[in-house]
Amino acid sequence: MIKVHIRFYEELNFFIRPEKRKQLIERHCKEGTTVKALIETCGIPHTEVDLVLVNGESRGFSYQLENNDRISVYPVFESFDIGKVSRVRPAPLRVIRFILDVHLGKLAKRLRLLGFDTLYSNTYTDEELSELSKKERRIILTRDTGLLKRKIITHGYYVRSRDPKEQLFEVIRRFDLFHSLKPFSRCIQCNEVLGEIRKDKIEQQLPDKVLEKYDRFYSCKRCNKIYWLGSHWKSMKKTLETISGNQHYL
Ligand SMILES: [Zn+2]
């Protein structure tokens, strides 16, 4: 057995028991244990980690621990300037796409409402979620830290809040998506891209009340659902503007 010391920085402390937060933690492990395995036995999914320093030098997840190593673990934090030292993750994904676990159905709908390519099904197994995430380069959003510990997953995020509305803001803030919102560009039901449709083409299908009040409509070519800028959308727009400091992103 060897003895090492490890410290977690910033938001990674979310995963640590309160009495151990922000402290140098002593751990005993077998010689040859990887730093990834150590981090995860401390309860932190590797997808939350961006930088690992061992005795002051940046190391990859496969680094094998030695006696008396001192390890500093930093979260994924885009504006944190780590300069020349190398990050443990591959390059960030250029196009933000998500896949959500079976418990995040409401969040999936909200993300689609704002135009984000979001795969969701309440029948996905952990294997399917991991495979799809890798194959389609999608960020997994989940409240299951076990899922994020799978080696195959490189981009994932543990959603802290339990409230779907707060979860949406959390994801937008975390991935800094305020400038990427494209409301009414994607079907909430099936994730297909929406197109604008002329009012006279859909008059037969909508109640008079809606036709009197609205002029712009969007339709999904896969499931034929029709959308308009109703009150639900307006309240979300208002809330988003409030949390983003009243800036008009939409
Ligand atoms: Zn659809």
Image (tube, rainbow, N blue to C red):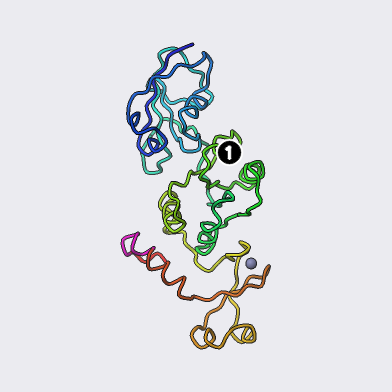
Residue 129 lies left or right of residue 41; in this view the side is right
Residue 117 place in picture, x, y as percent: 57, 57
Name the one closer to the observer, 66 or 4.
Answer: 4
Looking at the rendering, in which quadrant would you find the C terminus? bottom left
Graded by Cα atoms within 10 Å as few (under 14), some (14 to 19) or many (20 or more), the crowding at tag 1 reads many
Residue 43 place in picture, x, y as percent: 47, 32
- At a point 60% along the width and 69% down the height, the residue shown is 194
Instruction: Point out the stretch of residues depicted in magenta.
Output: 240-246
- At a point 60% along the width and 78% down the height, the residue shown is 197
Q: Which kind of residue does numbered mark 1 sit on?
A: Ile
Residue 60 place in picture, x, y as percent: 50, 27
Residue hosting label 1: 153
- At a point 55% along the width and 34% down the height, the residue shown is 149
Name the one closer to the observer, 20 or 92.
Answer: 20
Residue 17 lies left or right of residue 218; in this view the side is left
Question: Height in image: 38 above or below 223?
Answer: above
Residue 61 place in picture, x, y as percent: 51, 27
Asked if residue 75 lies in the magenta stretch, the reply is no
Label 1, ligand 1: CB separation under 8 Å: no
Which element type, helix, strand or loop, lies under badge 1?
loop
Residue 234 lies left or right of residue 192; in this view the side is left
Question: Height in image: 163 above or below 51?
Answer: below
Question: Height in image: 86 above or below 70?
Answer: below
Check the image and name the residue furthest to the right.
222
